[in-house]
Structures are given as C-alpha cells and as structure tokens.
Image (cartoon, coloured by chain):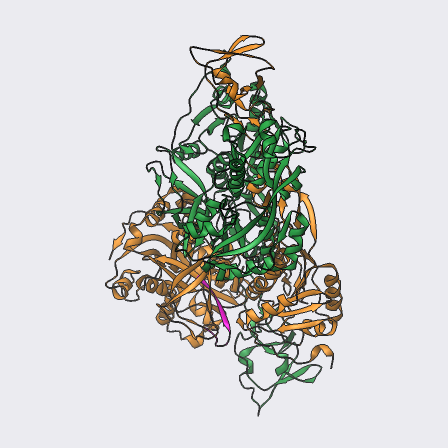
Chain colours: A green, B orange
Amino acid sequence: MSPYKRKIYLENKPRQEARHEMLANFQPKRKVEWIPSVSALGRITAEPIFAQSSMPHFHASAMDGIAIVAEETFSAHEQNPLLLRRNEDFIHVDTGNEVPPPFNAVIMIENVEERDEDSVEIIEPAAPWQHIRPIGEDIVQEEMLFPQGHEIRPVDIGALVAARTLTIPVIKKPAVTVIPTGNELVSAEDAASVGQLIEFNGSAFVNYIREWGGDPLLTPVVKDDPEKIKAALLEAANTSDIVVINAGSSAGSKDYTVHILQEIGTVYTHGIATRPGKPVIIGKVNSTIVVGIPGYPVSAYLSLEWFVRLLICEYLGVNEPERQKLKVKIGRRMVGSMGAEDFIRVSIGYINGEYVANPLSRAAGVTMSLVRADGLLVIPPDILGYEQGEYAEAELYKPKHEIENAIVFSGSHDLTIDLLSSKLKAENRSFSIQASHTGSMAGMMAIKKGEAHLAAVHLLDPETKEYNTSYIKRFLQGTEVVLYPFLRRKQGWLLPQGNPLNIQSLLDIVEKQAQYANRQKGAGTRVLFDMMMREEGVSPQQITGYEREMFSHLSVAAEVKGNPDGVGLGIYSAAKVMKLDFIPVADEHYDLLMTKSFFESEQGQTLIKVIQSDDFKQAVEQIGGYSLVQELEPLFF
Amino acid sequence: MSPYKRKIYLENKPRQEARHEMLANFQPKRKVEWIPSVSALGRITAEPIFAQSSMPHFHASAMDGIAIVAEETFSAHEQNPLLLRRNEDFIHVDTGNEVPPPFNAVIMIENVEERDEDSVEIIEPAAPWQHIRPIGEDIVQEEMLFPQGHEIRPVDIGALVAARTLTIPVIKKPAVTVIPTGNELVSAEDAASVGQLIEFNGSAFVNYIREWGGDPLLTPVVKDDPEKIKAALLEAANTSDIVVINAGSSAGSKDYTVHILQEIGTVYTHGIATRPGKPVIIGKVNSTIVVGIPGYPVSAYLSLEWFVRLLICEYLGVNEPERQKLKVKIGRRMVGSMGAEDFIRVSIGYINGEYVANPLSRAAGVTMSLVRADGLLVIPPDILGYEQGEYAEAELYKPKHEIENAIVFSGSHDLTIDLLSSKLKAENRSFSIQASHTGSMAGMMAIKKGEAHLAAVHLLDPETKEYNTSYIKRFLQGTEVVLYPFLRRKQGWLLPQGNPLNIQSLLDIVEKQAQYANRQKGAGTRVLFDMMMREEGVSPQQITGYEREMFSHLSVAAEVKGNPDGVGLGIYSAAKVMKLDFIPVADEHYDLLMTKSFFESEQGQTLIKVIQSDDFKQAVEQIGGYSLVQELEPLFF
C-alpha cells in the first residue's frame, strides 16, 4: 500500500487553538523595502518614521508684503508715518518667501505706502511674528510622524512629502504562493469542456491575499500526483513566506497533502472543529507555514480568512481587521453541530424596525451563498442552535445602511425580478432587492411572518380558476397587505432544442417516459403542474423525476438543456435565454404581494414608479412571453 | 487694472447646497471598459452581470466511484449482491467527472467489489442523485450574479470565474487632473531650498483620488500667472472627467482661479460656510466640473472629500462611504463660528469608560492635526459650540478598538516618549500611545480631570529642590495616582553650532542680546528657566523673545538651528538630533504620573514592562543625555 493511501481521520481541533499553534510556529522573515512615500498608500511602516525637515523649514511669510523688525515699528501711527528703507529696515516678501533674521514680522502689501524705489511708509506698528508661519509650525524636524506598524493613508503621504521624507521603509509584502490541485480542474483560461471543472478558488484566493496586503502567486493546476504535489510544495516553500495548497486536504484516497507534509515537514493540525471548513491542514516545510485549504468554495474562503489572513497580518505586524457586528433576530431556526462552530451565511432584512436574519444555503459548495450573504452568524460549539425569535450577533459583509435600504423579496422566481432590481438601483442607488426564490406559497408565508417586504405569487385556485386572491383571503387574514397586479406570463413545456421526444402534452411525458424536472412544493409552477396532473388523472408515480425538486425556472431549464430526454414546466423567458424549445400551456397572473407599510414606504413607492415606467415596460416586453398589467389598481386586503 | 485683480468677496454658501448644485451640473460621460474578471477587484459593474455557464455545468460526481441508474439497484442487499456490467450498468467516475444520462447516482468506490475487468458487485441500493452535484447546484446559467453598480470583492471573482464569466463590463475610472499652482512651490522631487516650499498637497490628492476609485493625474506646478493657469485649466477640462486646481481659490490679489473660470466657463460657488475650507470654488469649463481647493492642507483634504469624492462616487454610481460614528464626551470646550460648520479634529481617549474628545490644533495649515486625529467633530452652523462635559457625535478616522486601546499621554515632551510608544507597539501591537505635548503642569491637570491616563512631569520645587512630589501633594489631593520614576535627563543651553555668541550662562543671554526661544507656561523647562531667572535676578524684559512660546524641545531646537543669534533651554537629545551645541545646566527628574487604575491595567503593566526591559534601556542610553532610574519603586499617592 502506498504511503499516500493510509486511512486517516480528521481531528476536531478548536479553530482558535489551531490559529494559536500556527502563530507559535510562524517565524516570519520580514523583509523591509524603501519605497517612495508617494507610492506608499496602504503600506505598513517598518520602523518609526521621523520628519527629515521642518514644515515650513524656514520662517515663511504668510502674506505678500514687507518683512520688518516688529520692535522698530512701534512708533508708527496715522499721524506719524514711519519711513523704512529697503534692505536696511525692510525687504520685500511674497507669500511663502523666507523671512530671514533679524526680521520678525510681515506687513501686508496693502498696508504699505510706496515712497520711492527704496523706501516705504507705514502708519501702523506690527506685532512680533505677525503674518509669519514659523519654522516647524506644522511639522518639526526629527519629530516622529508615525510609529512602526502604521498603515499609510493619503493624508500621511501629504505629511511625509511636507516633511521631505521622500522615501520610507515599509514591510515588504509577504509572498504567498497558491497551489491549486485536482485532476478534474482546468485553469480559468482554458475553456472547460464537459467533465472538466474550471479552477476558480485560486482566482478568489489571489484577490483575497492582495486585499489583505500579501503578494500572491498562483501556480498552474497540479494533478493529484504525490510526486508532483511534493515538488510544488518544496519549490513554493523555498520561494515564499506562506504557502497555500487548495484541496486534497481531506482524508480521502486522493487527499495526499497531509501525507506529503508529514514526509517533508511537520503537520500541526489536520481537521478543525468548524462547519464548513473542517478539513484544514496546517503544517510547515522548512521554515515556511503551509496551509491546506478545503476544496469547496465556502469552506475555502472562510478558512483562508481564518488562517492565511492571520499569517499575513502577523507578517505585516498589524491587527486583523474586524467587521461591523449587528444584533439580529433569528428568522428561521438554525441548528448547529455540537462540538463545532457552525458558520451560517445569512441574509439580513430590516423589517418592522428589526434586523431579521435568515440562513442561506448551508452547502459548502455554494459560492453564491457567500456572494449573496449580508452577514455571517456563528453557532458556538456548546449550543444546539438558535430558535426563531432569538437574538444573536452577526458579522456584517455589507454596510448596515445597505441592509437597511434593501427590499427583502421572497416568493416565486421570475427573470423580470432581476430586471426590476437593476432598474430600481438605477432609479435610486441606495435601494436594492435582496431576493430569495422560495416559491409562491413560501413567499406568502414570509409576508405573513414579517420575514419579507415583498413577494411574487402566481397561485391558481383549482376551484375558481382565479389567481392569488383566494389564497390571500385564506392565509393572510388579519395581515394588512396589498396585491399589486404585475405581469401576465406564459408558462409552458421547456424542451431540448428540436423536441427530440416530440412532447406536446402532459400525457406525452407519461407515455414517452420523458425525464421531468419538477419544482419544489409550494411553487406556483408546481401547483399548476399538480392541477394538470389531477385533471388528466396522472399520478406522481407515472412521472419520471417527480421526486427531485428544483428551485427556479432557470434550474429547470438548465436541467432540460443537459438531457435530450428532459422536459420541464416553466416560463417562456427561461426557455429563451437557455435556447430551449417552448410549448405554451397557460397564461398566468404573476403578481406582487406586499405589506401595506412597505407599499406606503419610499422604497415601495419607488418600486411602483419603476414598474410603471416606460423604460421598464419596454425592457420586459423585449424579453418576450410577458405582458405588463396596465389597467389594474392595487388591491388592499 | 487687470481683470484678474478685481477685489471680490467670498460667499458663505452652505456646504450641502454647494454639493447639490455641483451634482445638478455634473453630467458625467461614463465610459465602460471590459476587463478580465480576475483583475476586477474593487471595480464597479457597469451593467447587471449574468452567469455565462452553470456551476457545475454538467451533473458531476462528488466522489470517486461508479455511476449507475439508482432505480436498477433497489434489489441489491448484503444477502443478495447485485452484479453490474461495465458500460451497460455502470461507468467508472472520479470526483468531478460527468455523470451522463441515463445514470442518476454514484456509488463510492469503497462500496464496490470488483469481480473482473468488466463487472462489479454492490450490496446496497443507491438513492437517486446520491453523490451527484447536479447542474447549476451553485450557479445557474443566465442567473444574475450582480446588478450594475456592484463593487467586486474577492468572493465575487470566485463566482465569476466559476460561472465562466471571464470578462465583465466595469465603469472606467474617472480621469481626475490635479493642477497645483503657486510661485512659492516646487515639486516634491526637487530639493526645496530656503524660500521654496515643497508641493505636497498634490501627492496627498492623487492618493485620495486613487483610494476613492478615480484615475488621478498630477500636473507640474503652474506659476501664479493667469495665462498659464488658463491654459492648464482648458487642457485639463478637455482631457479629464474632473479637474482639481489647488490654491489660488481665495480672494487675494494673486487668486486668479475664480476670474479665469468666469472668463472661460461658469462659477457656481465661491466660498462655503465651513471652517476650515471656506475658499472653495466650484465651476465648470466646457462640460467638465472644476473644483478649486484651498491651499492650507487641512482645508484642502476636507474640501477634496466634500466635493471631489462626491463627484467620483457619482461618476461610478456608488454611494459615498460612511465612517463609523461615535458619541463622545467633550473634554475641552470647543467654540464654533455661528453661520458656518466648524470641523474640529479631535483626539479621542477612552478614559474611565467614556470616549473623551479633545480638540487638536485648529489651524488649517497644520497637516499633523489631521494625521493625528482620531476623529472629526462638526459644530453645526446654528450652535455656539460645545461645553466641557457635553456629548456630541464624532466621525471616526480610526477603528473604535484602536481608540479603546490607546494610552492617552499628556504632559512634558521628551524624545524617549516616541521611543516608548514604538517599543510598546512592538510588545503588543494593539496598544499605542496617543501623545499631546502640553507641558508638565497641564499634564498633571489632565490626570486630575480624567483627560489622560499618563503624564510626564519634571516640575522642580524652587523651595525644596525636589521634583514633582510637592506638586502632586498640592494639586492632586484626592486623586489616586502613581508616580513612576522614569529618567534623569540633562537640560542645558541649545546653541547654534560653534556657539557664535559664546553663550555660557543666563547672564550671557541677557548681555549678548541673544534671541531666546522660550517654552510655554507650565512646561517644566519654563519652570526651570523662570527659577534660574529669579535666582539671577533677571526680568522677562531683559530676555529677547521671552514672550513667544514653543511647545516642544524640538520646536526650540528648530528655532535655534535657524538663527545664529538664537538660544534655548532644552534637553540634550534635542540638541543631538538637530546637531546643535549643548551646554548642560541641570540633571532633572523626568517621571511618569499615572492614575492608579491605569497603573493596574494591562496597558499600564505592559508599559512598565517595556520601560524595565533591557532593550528599552539600551535604546535610551544610546540617545545620550539620559539615565534610567533603576532602583526606585513607584510612589502611590
């Protein structure tokens, strides 16, 4: 058995313990470089910086005028003008000129009467040091401008240049080599064919590292081959201050990193008590710390921050930056794993004066859960989780005022919501739509529970064949809401190009055993499909794929696109952007449901204004498959 | 009379009105550029960005194993192994490989028993879609990743690459030309001789502009010549999105900018109701906004932020960033100017659980007041100011935790305090010393009033010839303080090199009419000098320069350095760094006074530890003129 195949198990080391241990073993060889002060923005001073020169570095006139000896002017008076001779009693000075000794005051040119070429008269005495900026008024030579470890800001550059301190010693940025590994990966530049996944973590890593003040180098993708990985690690350890190796950090048969590190160096940690992020490796090769980062992007970016940012800050001698914290109310229950910290990406809505946090996808593979997160919430290892209505502290990924101005959207997915979001931002860039696509029923419930301002609904009542209103009356009794008629949109069969199975109806799906891409329970499209099934007398067992649920029209379309035997029910616009065939089935009402307080708010009224704008109407009609409701008035419930 | 010499008066336009009016006249010609996503960190999206590809873009195996049709495995059981044939019933897949239809599940290789080359056995059924990452699990093709106006973060770059959206449209950075003007100025590269001031505002400006997302261009210094300024403005207006011209914006005889703008364009504002910052000009040449910024650095940097940052944000379509706000208690009274906003740079100390703000220098020419500021406090135009003990809101220039960890130092100035500050930061980088050099008496009073944690004092009692203790007993009754013996240091005459007037004593200063550089009232050095005068029977009238006060040893040394007839009383180290002659006069006690609670705090104990370290002792002795007090114990009062 190869030494790289030993079965191993991950530790469950507390994150802070792993961090402390790593730091204790980090002996950075800090390098110092002298750079021009004008290019030092954001750099960290390596030593205390002293002023090379005073500012001003001579007694400087603050006015255009004449420099005189104040004590010699004390007799000057309107009734008794004083005559002064050039070069003996005065010299001419402009703003900024030196006032040399013995002169100790300046009289403004406006208050000087010229007699002849070599003499002037004054009628008022001067106070000593008037209109003079004395040596060192701003900066005194040799004064300490900044201690070591100071991050240079624009104003500091002004002061440095003023003090003629034109080059300064700063900490060289630590060289951080990032090694992506994986047989399945291709570099971002190479087009990924089916079966090839694009390497994208590395591109995020180098930008994180850059932002934190490091100097990143991304190597080409290294195959899952122990010898190649070993060679890459040895070379990187030789040339860098910190090494990051991505994936291969777990305990599977192809996870070689920990074995290689044990062979060529030391392993301090393999596995930390966090979800996600568990399979982290911390080790050392020669004198260089190596951090093995898990492959799933959310685990990857979180653990990069926990370990690599810490190393970079330690190298630079600065504290880790802290994000703003906010007390939030838990919207939906969040369950943790005892014995581990759980990091939950949350959306935070500002609703009825409270900051309400709801979990986004907890899958470590969903980059978008981090992209869309307003904040991060940690369930500590010693508690079970947070119940709805409890309060907890979240770390914010966005400024608080952005969260306060966001419109929390729930309910049915439609591509026009993206368009609306974009047009709303163009109308008032402080406003944004924070959308989660939960389906019509869930959207309605979110409004009821005060978890959303706005929900899109298209719920067909099988009895009355009416949309939405009967549901509102049944489920939202006692809640003041407004139903704003928004769109008519075409629902229909989404089919691979050319419709290879020649599907024309629900019965064709059954007969030809097409693979159906279904939507989640409570989605309006699911309600429609289930109604059609009942009407045709088709049971779920007759539909291949009925059990698997997708959460948006685009997901259904993507599924159909990849499968010649596929079919789904969805909207025309999804078929159009994904270049699928489309057979219309229904023309449905897709309306906006909102709380009355939101409808009356500035955000609400701005939203309505955008919806009613010609610009928005044209853009919607351009997509196709829609018509905007023009005539109807909002309905108050 | 030249058209550029008309006497004009500044307006007093409210700042917000000037901002709104400027924006109303700003019609930016936004340009869009397509750039690689991996280089887009910090850039602003010009349009909504949609995913070019799903992630994953095929059903991908999440494990090494075999892909099978789940429904065909339902009979598999430990007692009833199921034989599967390669290519018919299964295919081999590695992590990340495609799982093509009709396969819809993966069985881990660990759970597969190889029979022969072409067949395997399984003993457990597979659930549909197990160990498969379905198409679009993370990102669905055509989904909107970001709206327009979104600032790209590292995680976004990960998502963009994952979605194979490898180039994106971003707003081109606005071109901002900065024109420094002034006869007295030379560019930073040219060594400034006496009579020449170095142009440093421009260097700060370009870095501010860069930080705000603009693309700055700094032109060479333009002389105060209307034709040259006109030519520079016309050229810049032609080639840039925004033009900044520095100085010449006031109403003096050489302040040409406003006249030129009236001639070649439009002037909207000349003078805003702020202190500092009043002489701002806002105008337009062709379709380009020109902002005339006052010359004094504090006015300059504040007004650049008020106007130029606003233009850049407007161009980019983003909101102006907001600084953290903090409620502070007013330490020393701050008086405003009715009818204008007063912007006071403040130091903020965290003392006895309160954030106490004290004004720094209010002179618009003192860059260091902005460099050293912890925050900015605005006195609105309709109130007189803030009284001691009142509360007001400050905008923070530093993170709150830095302010909380800072040791507020007051009292006598010494160069070893800089050294101590630097060594303290090396010991614990969260700690810093925030020093204001107020003199011994003021330092003692700051401790009494709870305005400082720590003060350096060297007050000689003329009666007892003892240092400090008698003053503490007299002035700090009822305050629990600790006096920590710190240094013995040499005070003496600071003299120009070679001692041209041959000063050896106080009486020489009187006799030779040397120009004495005095210290402020309450400074220990002033107390010493006054005592020497009394002992020698010399009166203030006999000392030339007695009335003018300087606030530090270095200021005195800088003054003496610039004047062959100068002399001052000061410490050896100041003479040494400024290369002056030094004649010792006294060996004095320079001690640290602190509140008992600070002495006992972590900061206090860390400070003591640093003082007692060999490293610090050696560094102090290397400066010369000092000896550290080794034997003495802290005295508790």
Placement of B379 over or under B487, stated as above or below: below
A338 on left or right of B102: left
Residue A160 screen position, x and y as percent: 57, 55
Q: Quadrant of residue B595?
A: bottom left
Q: For the image shown, how many numbered marks are present on the structure?
A: 0
Residue at horizontal 57%, vertical 52%?
A: A421
B38 on left or right of A443: right
What span is in magenta?
A: B336-346
Residue at horizontal 27%, vertical 54%?
A: B596
A271 on left or right of A39: left
Q: Nearer the viewer, residue A336 or A97?
A: A336
Residue A163 screen position, x and y as percent: 57, 57
Residue B617 screen position, x and y as percent: 39, 45
Is-magenta flag for residue B343? Answer: yes
Placement of A499 over or under B558, stated as above or below: above
Residue A106 screen position, x and y as percent: 58, 76
For the N terminus of chain B, the image quarter is: bottom right
Residue A218 in view (yes/no):
no
